[in-house]
Image (tube, rainbow, N blue to C red):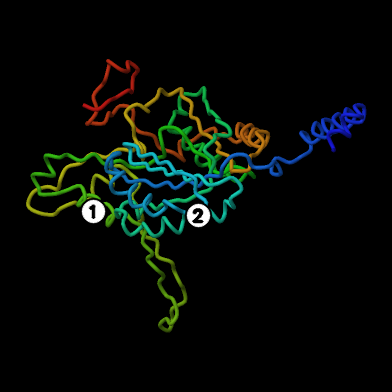
């Protein structure tokens, strides 16, 4: 009946169609992105890290307990997980279109909390993070430097310290991942023969470092109730965590008639890969991942363009880099795959 009405009045039908197209054209430029109807299933991501574990160990000790608990959560469509050989585990849970993402995150987080007791101690110490995150990358930003003193390690830390938090506060940004060589840290190289000769294990070295390199609250002197004549109240400052190579080399691992297990320390990165060592003139990249309700790229670009103005001129007092004249003992130059200076691979 309604179709016959418009068939008999083609002019009216064309006018209504043109008005509908005009309203849609205006809505493209005026309707906020947050009011667009959701067409993609929302996702919740669970991430954790097991230092030193390979992919098979992650599957058996981390993936199975978590996925057994998360499986079957309310309004879940499917889930997929990734276990890498560097100890990183990622689980992405996809829900039905229209599901309240805040409520879905709480449900997944409760299921993950039930599996924490079954996870290794190293995973529990690092923590298991549950976030609302889209699998699509909103934008990839690259940092470059023409000055040799600003290497890949410096650019990676600059992005982590100066840009990551500011971009993560933008409306619609779910997370910011920094790709690159990693963050400044202290890596300890152990000598297996010396450890075996002194009946030591890597866990003994780790415990020694934890006990001898930690922040201590020393308290105060002269706090009430104080003896008569005590006029001053002083705060005691003691040496905290170690931050120099020589300090780590002086750590006592075992005390006996022989010398302690020998080890060499230097300052490379926390997550080291033999293929990430780059030349002094390098570039670092990081990505912005949007929340489930998309955002506009115009919000990211002004923040990134303003970083050029605050780029530090001199970083010698704020950062320390790995000495270039020393190479890690467990690596050998691999000319078959990489002929660039500074490229190393496992023996």
Determine which residue is flagged by label 1.
208
The correct choice, above or below, for 204 with respect to 299 in the image is below
Q: Which mark is residue 97?
A: none
Left/right of residue 72 with respect to residue 38 in the rendered view: left
The correct choice, above or below, for 257 with respect to 286 in the image is below
Q: Callout 2: helix, strand or loop?
A: loop
Left/right of residue 345 with respect to residue 131 in the rendered view: left
Quadrant for the C terminus in the image: top left
Left/right of residue 175 with respect to residue 302 in the rendered view: left
Quadrant for the N terminus in the image: top right
How far apart marks 2 and 1 lie (CA) works out to 46 Å
Relative image position of residue 247 (x, y in whole percent): 28, 47
Camera-side residue of 331 and 179:
179
Relative image position of residue 273 (x, y in whole percent): 33, 32
Camera-side residue of 245 and 101:
101
Determine which residue is flagged by label 2.
74
Camera-side residue of 175 and 226:
175
At 43% from the left and 82% from the top, the residue drawn is 225
């Amino acid at each position: 009946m309604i179709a016959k009405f418009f068939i008999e009045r083609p002019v009216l039908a064309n006018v209504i169609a043109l008005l509908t197209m005009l309203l849609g054209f205006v809505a493209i430029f005026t309707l906020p992105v947050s009011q667009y109807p959701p067409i993609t299933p929302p996702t919740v991501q669970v991430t954790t890290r097991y230092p030193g574990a390979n992919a098979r160990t992650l599957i058996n000790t981390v993936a199975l307990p978590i996925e057994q608990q998360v499986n079957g959560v309310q309004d879940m469509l499917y889930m997929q997980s990734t276990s890498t050989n560097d100890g990183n585990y990622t689980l992405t849970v996809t829900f039905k279109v229209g599901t309240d993402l805040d409520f879905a995150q709480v449900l997944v987080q409760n299921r993950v909390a039930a599996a924490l007791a079954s996870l290794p101690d190293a995973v529990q110490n690092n923590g298991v993070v549950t976030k609302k995150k889209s699998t699509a990358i909103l934008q990839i930003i690259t940092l470059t430097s023409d000055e040799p003193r600003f290497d890949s390690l410096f650019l990676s830390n600059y992005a982590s310290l100066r840009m990551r938090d500011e971009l993560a506060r933008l409306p619609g940004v779910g997370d910011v991942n920094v790709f690159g060589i990693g963050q400044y840290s202290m890596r300890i190289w152990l000598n297996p023969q010396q450890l075996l000769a002194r009946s030591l294990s890597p866990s003994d070295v780790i415990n020694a470092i934890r006990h001898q390199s930690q922040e201590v609250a020393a308290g105060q002197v002269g706090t009430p109730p104080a003896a008569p004549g005590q006029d001053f109240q002083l705060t005691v400052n003691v040496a905290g965590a170690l931050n120099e190579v020589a300090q780590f080399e002086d750590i006592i691992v075992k005390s006996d008639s022989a010398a302690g297990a020998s080890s060499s320390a230097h300052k490379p990165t926390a997550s080291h890969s033999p293929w990430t060592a780059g030349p002094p003139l390098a570039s670092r990249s990081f990505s912005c991942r949007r929340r489930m309700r998309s955002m506009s790229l115009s919000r990211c670009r002004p923040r990134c363009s303003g970083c050029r103005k605050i780029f530090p001129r001199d970083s010698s007092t704020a950062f320390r880099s790995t000495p270039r004249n020393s190479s890690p003992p467990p690596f050998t130059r691999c000319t078959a795959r990489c002929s660039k200076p500074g490229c190393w691979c496992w023996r």
